[in-house]
Image (tube, rainbow, N blue to C red):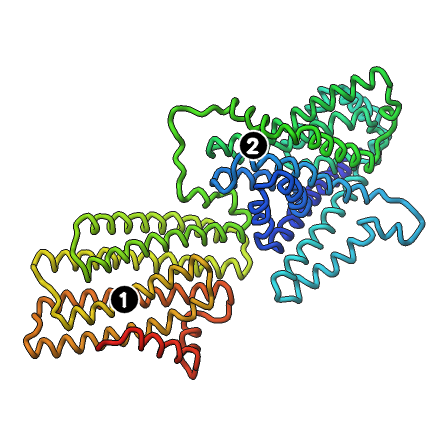
Amino acid sequence: MTIFNFLTLLGGLALTLYGMNVMGNGLTKTSGGKLEAILEKFAGNPFKGLLFGAIVTAVVQSSSATTVMVVGFVNSGIMKLTQAVGIIMGANIGTTITSWLLAMTSISSDNFLIQMLKPTSFAPILAAIGIVYIMFYKNEKKKHLGDVFLGFTILMTGMSMMSVAVAPLANVPEFTGILTLFSNPILGMLCGALLTGIIQSSAASIGILQALCVTDAITYSTALPIIMGQNIGTCVTALLSSVGASKNARRTALIHLYFNVIGTVLFMVLFYTADAFVDFAFLDMPANAFGISVIHSLFNVAATIVLFPFGNLLVKLSCMTIRDDDQLETVSEFQTLDDRFLSNPAYAIERAMQVTNRMCEICKTGLLEAFDLVIGKYDESSEQKIEALEQKVDHFEDKLGTYLVKLSKYELSQEDSRKISILLHSIGDIERMSDHSVELARSAREMDEKGMTFSGSARNEMQVFTDALRDIVTRTSEVFEKEDVALARTVEPLEQVIDDLNAQIKQNHVERLKNGECTIEMGFVLSDISTCYERLADHCSNLAVCQIQVHKGEYDTHEYLQAVKQKNEVFDREKEKFALAYHLS
């Protein structure tokens, strides 16, 4: 084997790993976060968790990626530890699909149809389609599908390069001698685990083993323990990702390790015990790519069948390893903003939107308290509650802003990039609305301390004004909670009515001043409150438009607001309805 063969081997390995990465990322982006949502949804049923764990892993081409995602689910409290077991076992089955794809490169036949089943035969066609999708289509899903096709082609090219590079090793006695060492089960397992741990991909390490089969120097007695070790080595990624996570997240990574270690030990003991009595003749035969795929799949399916009924025991074993202490772990409202989700922006954005919904709900609670202070009796404890809620909203803005900025540094689709921008604007609006709740509480305190009260007519007007604000704030919060686009379209007409109310109330106050029915000092307080109300309505309008943008993506904010106001009968009817509901007598 020359230095050029070695360089070709390195290049083939690099292309194989890169192809897997491109193909997996393309499939993940094509799904738009739906795969993770499926896992989250069906985790409650162990059998469904097992099934969808296998399907998702087969799609993303990485059991490590699935397991890391599950660690993130458990760490963020989305999934219970017991629910993670089935998905982890399913991931081990799903990852065997890659080895079957790679095994198809060894198909040999003169039949045209059979030859076309060989990935290296149809990969160039996929590459051509993929490059057309990427270069000439603007649709992002088409571009992601192009990434999948090109990634698959790169993967197959890498496998072919590795096979060509190692072929000369068939004539190197020293190479055969080294491989003989790995016939020792312990050494073979250590070699497989070490290789997989280094490249952090069991599928890639299986591919390397399949490529070496072209030398006819790999026997099944050598390949079998290496395959067992590869299943253990794939646990490294999840273990590394769990560092610094919650106890249950670390236990999830351990369950993955224990499943593979226990399954491997059971398989090796039973297999070599049976071999001592039966003497399996196939062990001395040269291995081939399909044989390796069969062993890999049989082991993972058999291990799952045997250990699936004992999932709760695996959970107990992980809990015995990482014990609870007297100090209870606090569950943060921000655990769902897990950095493990950042590699899948579409899903990370969904988590960020859920936390934003919670931020909006807290803001609404503070505002409703503030409205009660404005038109009711001032209470110091209510003001303290409003200030505490405002500080909480500030904390949400800081955490969400930091997470979204981190997310923006990843490779994003245009849609995901737009959603992040909209979310950043939304949390800014929510935070400023929360600030207004504190300002309203302070205005109510000022009125109480100075013994000021609204006149009868002013109180009636402020009651109507406040009711309109309650409506728009509650409506906007519901828009966020239910992602109701139809409801979001009713916010702007109500905002227009509130603007009209503000102008009319200020004009009425001037008239009362002229008639001596109100004081200038009271006018300052009234002006502060009405200004807060008007700005709150503006922020609600911004938030509603953001929700429409997220789901439709048709307009920017300015264009949308201009469009709905110009000769829009639906808008006019909604505005008239609100004007009748909130009119000053």
Q: Is residue 322 visible?
A: yes
Please give left or right for residue 439 compared with residue 253 in the image: left
Looking at the rendering, in which quadrant would you find the C terminus? bottom left
Give the x, y percent position of residue 491: 38, 69
Give the x, y percent position of residue 209: 76, 34
- Secondary structure, mark 2, is helix
Residue corresponding to mark 2: 253
Neighbor class of circle 1 (other Cα within 10 Å; few <14, some 14-19, many 20+) is: some
**Could you say which is closer to the camera, residue 412 or residue 583?**
583
Give the x, y percent position of residue 254: 56, 29
Question: Could you tell me how many numbered marks the image carries?
Answer: 2
Residue contact at pointers 2 and 1, CB within 8 angstroms: no
The disc labelled 1 sits on which kind of residue? Asp
Looking at the rendering, in which quadrant would you find the N terminus? top right
Q: Is residue 212 visible?
A: no
Please give left or right for residue 279 compared with residue 364 in the image: right
Please give left or right for residue 27 compared with residue 221 in the image: left
Residue farthest to the top, as pictured: 277
Frontmost of labels 2 and 1 is 1
The disc labelled 2 sits on which kind of residue? Ala
For residue 381, the mark is none
Residue farthest to the right, as pictured: 110
**Mark nearer the N terminus (2 vs 1):** 2
- Secondary structure, mark 1, is helix
Neighbor class of circle 2 (other Cα within 10 Å; few <14, some 14-19, many 20+) is: many
Residue corresponding to mark 1: 467
